Image (cartoon, rainbow, N blue to C red):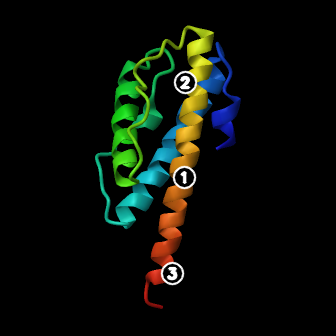
Amino acid sequence: MDTLSIVKFGDPESLGEFLFENGVQHLLFWETLTDLGRSYPKFPITDANVNNLDDWLLAHQVEHQAIASYLDLSNPFNMLDVDFKKEDDFYDWLGTHLTIERVSMFIVSSSSKQLLLTMPQ
């Protein structure tokens, strides 16, 4: 998840890396939650276009809402309420998103460890 914290404003290359890494993270969430019997619609968020993020933001929001619901978390902030052309918006969004991803990852990894401990050998 290091790429999530080093994306730079105005740098399409680092944004593209972030989008890909975030998509991989979401795939891990989806696979783990599906293994735990908690399936939800999966969107191709690794295919985001750095020049047009509207569809990505919507799909991303829907996935985060599903993840939050399954993990018993409050709904995430409104991910659609951002202007990535404004530096403050960009970094505020990234910071909040990173926090949500880290909390989700902690809970998902804890849940999957619990599942492994309860499975018959």
- Whether residue 16 is visible, yes or no, is no
What residue is shown at x 39% (from left), y 46% (from top)? 68
Q: CA distance from mark 2 to mark 1?
A: 18 Å
Q: Please state, as top left, top right, bottom left or bottom right, where the N terminus lies in the image.
A: top right
Outermost residue on the bottom side: it is 121
Residue identified by numbered label 2 = 93
Q: Which residue is the site of mark 3?
A: 117
**Residue 70 horizontal side relative to residue 113, left or right:** left
Amino acid at dot 3: Leu
Identify the mark at residue 105; answer none if there is no mark. 1
Decide: marks 3, 2 in contact (CB < 8 A)?
no
- All told, the count of numbered labels is 3
Q: Secondary structure at mark 2?
A: helix
Residue 121: percent from left, percent from top:
48, 91
Please tell me which of labels 2 and 1 falls first in the chain.
Answer: 2
Asked which secondary structure carries label 1, the reply is helix
Identify which residue is drawn at 38% across, 32% down.
61
Query: Residue at position x 32%, y 59% from top?
Result: 38
Horizontal side of residue 66 vs 93, given as left or right: left
